[in-house]
Amino acid sequence: MTLPLPLRNRLADLILDALHDGDARRGLEVLAAVCADAHALDAGGPPAGFPAELFDRGPDGWHLKSAFRQHTSALGERAARAARALAARPLSATNPPLDIALEEAAALFEAGLYFEVHEVLEPYWMRSDGSDRQTLQGLIQAAVGFQHLANGNVEGARALLHEGAAKLIAQRLLGRDLDGFARALIRCEREVVALGAEAARGFDWAAAPRFPPEA
């Protein structure tokens, strides 16, 4: 289920904050727990990083506000993936160097958090130039392509996987070989084209490539 924009954006902000802020990381963990069990906070109040403004608290526990309640499971599942992806990572600086940002993007990409990969990399793309700008844009387009596919936007997914691959073939970024990743994107694009309108349901997510590893 696609999250409505207020939930998607609030969760993305929390995930990005959790890269460098311990309170946000704890809030993310508790968010996942409360979505799974409304009584997860019965023993005490929410931690500082918990997005309490999204919830109503009552005798039966903490529940998403009524306008969002049907999205509880999807929000919790996404928050849980993020919490697992970040659990073993050290907290980084608020504005880390690009090599650290790429490590963060890799952790989020492997967790299927493609929108957040875009959010991590976009500031570096905006202030880069030359081949680095092209390769960062290609990585962003690949991530957004997979997010489109997860959301059911098949044509948007096909277009961005194609454009991302074209920018990454035979390229490197801080020692990361992007060529194999680009060729895997091409294979994914072909699968999306072959599946047509059924791609949103029929795509083999196990075939999605891993983020380009460090050399």
Image: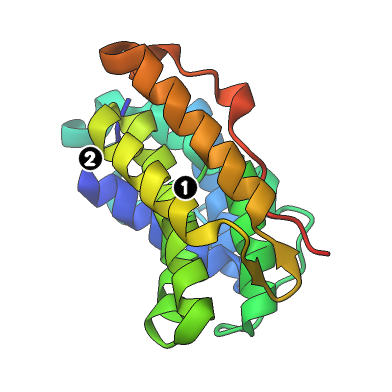
Residue appearing at x 28%, y 26% in the figure: 152
Residue 22: assigned label: none
Location of mark 1 (residue): 114
* Quarter that holds the C terminus: bottom right
Residue 4: assigned label: 2
Taking depth in this image into account, of 95 and 15 the one nearest to the observer is: 95
* Quarter that holds the N terminus: top left
Classify residue 77 as left or right of residue 106.
left
How far apart are the alpha carbons under marks 1 and 2? 16 Å
Which of the marked residues, 1 or 2, is nearer the chain's N terminus?
Answer: 2
Query: Could you say which quadrant of the image residue 155 lies in?
Result: top left
15 vs 41: above or below: below
Q: Position of residue 94 (x, y in %)?
A: 56, 83
Residue sticking out furthest to the right: 215
Residue appearing at x 26%, y 39% in the figure: 156
- Mark 1 crowd level (few <14, some 14–19, many ≥20, 10 Å Cα): many
> Which tag is nearer the camera, tag 1 or tag 2?
1
Taking depth in this image into account, of 70 and 183 the one nearest to the observer is: 183
> Is residue 83 visible in the rendered structure shown here?
no
- Give the amino acid at mark 2: Pro
Residue appearing at x 39%, y 44% in the figure: 162
- Give the amino acid at mark 1: Tyr
SS state under label 2: loop
